[in-house]
Image: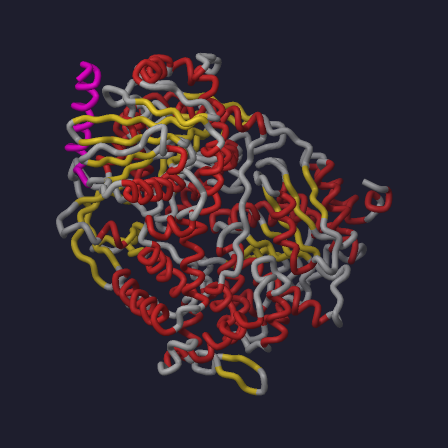
Amino acid sequence: MNSEAEISKGYRVIEQWLETQGLAPFAFQQAVWQHIAQGHSGLVNAPTGCGKTYSVFLGALIQFINQYPDSYTSQKNNGLQLLWVTPLRALAKDIGRAMETAIAQLGLQWKVGIRNGDTTTGERQKQKNHMPEVLIITPESLHLLLAQKQYPQTFATLRIIAVDEWHELLGSKRGVQTELAISRIVGCLVEQNGGALDNVLSLWGISATIGNLQQAMDVLLYPVKAYTTPVIVKANLHKQTEVFSIIPAEIEKYPWAGHLGIRMAAEIVPIIEQSTTTLVFINTRGMSETWYQTLLQVAPQLAGAIALHHGSIEQELRLWVEDALHTEKLKAVICTASLDLGVDFRPVNTVIQVGSPKGVSRFLQRAGRSGHRPGDISTIYFLPTHALELVEAAALKQAIVQGEIESRDPMLLCYDVLIQYLCTLAVGGGFKPDTILAEIQNTHCYADINRADWEEVLLHITSGGRALQQYDEYKKVEVENGLYFIRSRRIAMRHRMHIGTIVSDAMLKVKFMTGGYIGVIEEYFISRLEPGDVFTLAGRNVELVAIKDMTVFVKKSNAKKSQVPSWMGGRMSLTANLGRVLRQTFDAIADNNLQEPELKSLQPLFDLQRQLSHIPKHDELLIEQIADKDGYHLMVYPFEGRQVHEAMSALMAQRISRIIPITFSIAMNDYGFELLSDKPIPVDDTNASELFTTDNLLADIQKSVNSVEMASRKFRDIAVIGGLIFQGFPGEQKKARHLQSSASLLFKVFSEYDANNILLRQAYQEVFDQQMEEVRLRNALQRIQQSRIIIRFPQQLTPLSFPIIADGLNRNNLSSEKLEDRIKRMQEDLAKGK
């Protein structure tokens, strides 16, 4: 710190308060306080649990105390000073609690408010009448603020915007919402301050683990780059992470996904009992329900001491779990990504990760939930759900040492979010196009929007665009004296209902017939059930009685067997970084240099793979051709992740079918993919390399998958976000299939009459960028082109091929009993050498 900052009243007050707490500020916190005092903006990067929140929050208090050195304890109703944007509702309460404690102990009169989907109408009205000094808000609720008539006055006193967990928002449409909201607030303050912003507003991002730190800051600070010198403040604090793998007593040579984990549930009971509190992270909501039930069966003594937490459990129960974690009433919580981010549960000293987290930063983020204090060691146990995941565990440990943290690519030109935003401004008092165009061009997402596309966006909100001009319901925004506004109360109300909508799958509320709300469930799962069927939600077995008005009515059930809901998007894909380290890990395996305990435990599996086929190194691509009674299997192992393999397998199938007319069924996992046919597959040393060329890649991708069908499904989400499809008022929402049919109709209309429509273009672009991961696919093919392709013809299935083939059976909708029996028979046959 320089002497000027050290002698400021605010700094001395905060330093003395920290001393009373037995704390001393870190150098990175002092640096942020200094930058805030000088009116700078930037990004704070520090490991989880090292005081990132205090770096910006206490900086705001120092700034305020310096402004009112003699009256800071008596200054009341100061207006909004600090806007704290957070991606998760679960974070808001915890951050608010910490802030209120500090404010009270310092004797300030500041109030802390929370604004998200859980905030009551009464509380919102109180905030409207008297805005608290600190407002903790989600991106969606921030857009709702912009729909209020006098919103510019709300931000008139604002000094600091903090975007917490920015790495979670970046690369998503919620991140784009945040960019747009900041651009509008900056616009309001520039106008109110006569065209300048110097020493008026500081904008700070707060981020833990992210690979592209500089770009992350540039994206966030784009709207204020003309008014500030951006700075990255990195904490030179090494957060020690200890990883322990739980190795099964017996390693199957023919592993299959998801099978092993639940059988090892008893192994984690001693870990839970020896720890103060443990978080057990499960990758999917469906499996978290299964694990909760299983742990109660294998350790009945934990009844009442363990709880379940995921995004589909109703709010009251979630909040109870979070409070019980703080007060050490719980020994363990089985959770999903709902507890991934910055919530400071101090009693948590152990984390268990069930199944591969598929990414390095996600693994570190979860590990950081334990030992959530500076200097504490984060302890995480890794429990594999099938044997080969132990290789991923070894790769994760190596990736942490190498600092292989994933980057998040920012989204560009999301017209659906822009259309929603313009309608929000039109509801909140109207907007002038030239003003807003200048502002949005000052965001990273829309910096390259051209005048023609901007005019089309305006045409879309005023008349429905070229294709829908005949229909009044699409004429939402009116123009008068150059001001664009929504006059119709009906349209305004409909829009307010869906401000902030970023589409997820249609969710239905689940209620007991006798009253009482349990949680929410996806429509696609419940639509497969009949009345009388039993399923599990929030750790309880319930029987379906009826579905009415988007509500599922149930009654309690004592049935021993139940169906566990599977939520869409439950299958995460290996990140590019972890895939790269995983391929490097196979170098050690190929050389039989097994140092890590995870790899040593798999020695019999590797020996069998080597004996039957080959173990590929990072610069090799293994292809196996296996013939058995099911047909001809072509197995390919790029180790690029499920999503890339999905696109690559379709591409290979399309290219092979050009050599000879042939049909395939396709299966894949994170390690490779299978093409299965009833006739020999013509792939050998003469043509293998050509199959992986990047020549004509885009055209071949379009031929290999039904990109029109994929774009049509993607268009449904875009149409909902962009307000083309109204989802209905509460209690009368349209069913997902009705939404899909409306979207399909619009998709056909646009395709036929307005082929260059911006939303249509966006749908195709998102399919290529997100579902097909076109950039990663291209990079993978280029890597393969420079690799040695090794083709083997094993006489039976190999340890690497077995989990992919088992996964393919799983998706042929065999019931779980039939699937398990079938796979066990296959394992037995292979053990006998059949």
* Horizontal arrangement in the rendering, residue 543 relative to residue 304 (left or right): left
Q: Is residue 689 above or below residue 746?
A: above
Residue 366 showing in the rendered view: no
Front residue of 573 and 201: 573
Q: Residue furthest bottom?
A: 481
Q: Quadrant of residue 472?
A: bottom left
> Does 476 appear above or below 6?
below
Image location (x, y in percent) of residue 14: 73, 44
| Residue found at the very far front of the displayed protein | 686
Question: Which residue is located at x 24 percent, y 40 percent?
Answer: 664
Asked whether 821 falls inside the magenta stretch, the response is yes
Quarter of the image where one finds residue 809 = top left
Q: Nearer the viewer, residue 2 or 399?
A: 399
Quadrant where the image shows the C terminus: top left
Q: Tell me if residue 187 comes above or below residue 632 in the rendering.
A: below
What is the x, y in percent for residue 378? Answer: 53, 28
Residue visible at 37% across and 41% down?
Answer: 648
**Residue 100 in the image: x percent, y percent?**
60, 49
Q: Is residue 674 left or right of residue 3?
A: left
Q: Is residue 432 left or right of residue 766?
A: right
Q: Which residues are magenta?
A: 813-834
Q: Main secondary structure of the magenta part?
A: helix
Is residue 401 at all visible to an observer of this figure?
A: yes
